[in-house]
Image (spheres, helix red, strand yellow):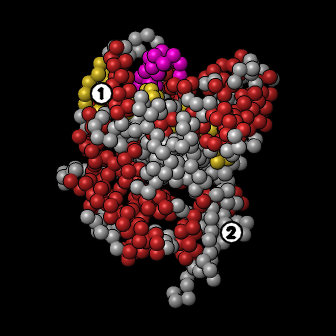
Amino acid sequence: MSEFSTEQVRHLAGLARIALTEDELGRLAGELGAIVDNVAIVQRAAGPDVVATSHPIPLVNVYRDDVPTETLTAAQAVAGAPEHDGSRFKVSAILGEEQ
Amino acid sequence: MSDLTRLSAAELAASLGKGEISSVDATQAHLDRIAAVDGDVHAYLHVNDAALAEASAIDAKRAAGERLPELAGVPVAIKDVLCTIGMPSTAGSRMLEGWVPPYDATVVERMKAAGLIALGKTNMDEFAMGSSTEHSAFGPTRNPWNLERIPGGSGGGSAAAVAAFEAPFALGSDTGGSIRQPAAVTGSVGVKPTYGGVSRYGAIALASSLDQVGPVSRTVLDSALLHDVVGGHDPKDSTSLTGAWPSFAEAARAGRRDGSLKGLRVGVVKQIADGEGFQAGVTQRFRESLELLADAGAEIVEVSAPNFEYAVAAYYLILPAEASSNLAKFDSVRFGLRVTPEGGGTVEQVMAATREAGLGDEVKRRIILGTYALSAGYYDAYYGSAQKVRTLIQQDFSAAFAQADVLVSPAAPTTAFKLGEKLDDPLAMYLNDITTIPANLAGVPGIGLPMGLAPEDGLPVGIQFMAPAREDARLYTVGAALEQLLEDRWGGPLLSQAPDLSASSMLAVSEGAI
């Protein structure tokens, strides 16, 4: 049985930038253990000789000629943002006081 | 005038082409139907207030003698995962509530170019994570066959919209079964095309190596017609396949001709054909469908895909891993919600507070799981092993397709379950897609269509066919052939046996229940 501690989930939530509540951390710790137990069977499916597949259909990278095409205007690009000044996204301070 | 909502898209197109009806008539009929039943069904998150104006513009062009595409003037519904100019595109999430994209998804652009009229945006599990549409932030969709039951997911809105005659057809997306499983439980048709066969540009990404956009409808021919419109290479999607595709509508029509199944090798995948977890009525109707195919000249062979046993596990590592990365874009900066913690905070604290408030439980669960699976020290054991399973499943498909032209299985293991029944048990919910996930892992196309009602509960059950990559046309041929055989047996489409929703709603009103 995979065990997840609340502290482990708190660390993962920090990496994922989600401010989970204490309730959520506790609940997820239990659920993640059960889910990981079930998905861990993938480890016994394949030996070291099997290559990994990242993509269902083999593809090569796609290039196009480096010429301008139609793009969004700055006003269109920021239109859906929570805060903007007409041409730029506005955010709060990047660094906190302790940084 | 007869009820236009009962016509297929192909029939509407034919009547429009002959000038027997107008696009305004067809659109108004569907808007009226939405007004009458969607309070109960909740298939739509947004109804297009410009639909009648767009329909009227098509009518004017037709009246002026302009040559129009075959489907011009036919109404369509669009899953809310697809970006649409002028209509909110939320993917069922509070995170994107009210967000109106500045561009159209390629499939939407092509749909407009074909003269199709968007009726609105359909409900879905948040960011397409779910099998019941109960994870929508805006409330569940209900199954038109029984309003107490789930319509499948994630595309329960699109499936319920066509099953409740609120649209003749719709666009959906399928990452692990989100088109085919809802089709199965609502008695409708849905197709997941070959990976790369339809552009994903403008589809809000869940898991980029699995996602595929496809059609949802009541008839096989209608899905083929919509696939013909939206499919084909798109330079804006770097995973889009190049090369020409045959006409899928022609493939579907070929299926209705005599002898279309003669000599076709149909492979029954042992691992997902029956056994534990499959409802008796599903197995029974599946066996009957195989007999029908055999009677029509198909050769039924059993094939084995031993690694399918690991498919669900691999899927629930690959999907969360890719989703945790794709959903990082919801950072409170460029679009959607922003929640500032009390007293302010750094951009990182604002981001974390926003994601806490804007994402639902299932989305958080999968992001955290994906973050774990991609963490240093666990990557090889989980994500790496899952990608190896993907190779093994592709090898299983190759071996199976050496013995059979198409593969067949039930499209879902059970009929629609009750709302709330599996909501608190994520693992039970994940097993709903056991039959559909292998196709996404291998990138091969699949079609789901109705195969009858389960005798024990009177609810629809679906059958799934799969074909090798790029051979989507085979699915339309065999699907249309079986559809015809079954409808001959039933004496008409399965959905004509669905309860009359408008009557039940009106009855409820007269009894003061709502």
Horizontal side of B83 relative to A42 (left or right) equals right
Magenta region, residue range: B474-493
Amino acid type assigned to the residue bearing label 1 in the image: Gly
Please tell me whether residue B136 is drawn above or below residue B396 in the rendered image. below
Q: Relative to B376, does residue B140 appear above or below in the rendering?
A: above
SS at mark 1?
Answer: strand
**Residue B220: image location, x then y, percent:** 51, 26
Residue ranking furthest to the bottom:
A98
Q: Is B227 or B421 nearer to us in this picture?
A: B421
Marking on residue A83: 2
Residue B434 can be seen in this image:
yes
Quadrant of the rendered structure where residue B452 is?
top left
Image coordinates of residue B254 in percent, x first then y, are: 47, 16
Label 1: which residue?
A: B267
What amino acid is labelled 2 in the image? Glu
Q: Nearer the viewer, residue B376 or B483?
A: B483
Asked if residue B483 is among those painted magenta in the image, a careful observer would answer yes
Q: Position of residue B346 (x, y in %)?
A: 57, 79
Q: Which mark is residue B147?
A: none
In magenta stretch: residue B78? no
In percent of the image, x 66 and y 72: which residue is there? A90
Is B277 above or below relative to B289?
Answer: below
Please determine whether, in this image, residue B327 is positioned above or below residue B339: above
Classed neighbour count for the residue bearing mark 2: other residues with Cα under 10 Å, few (<14), some (14–19), many (≥20): some
Question: What's the residue at 43%, 21% (across, down)?
Answer: B482
Q: Nearer the viewer, residue B429 or A15?
A: B429
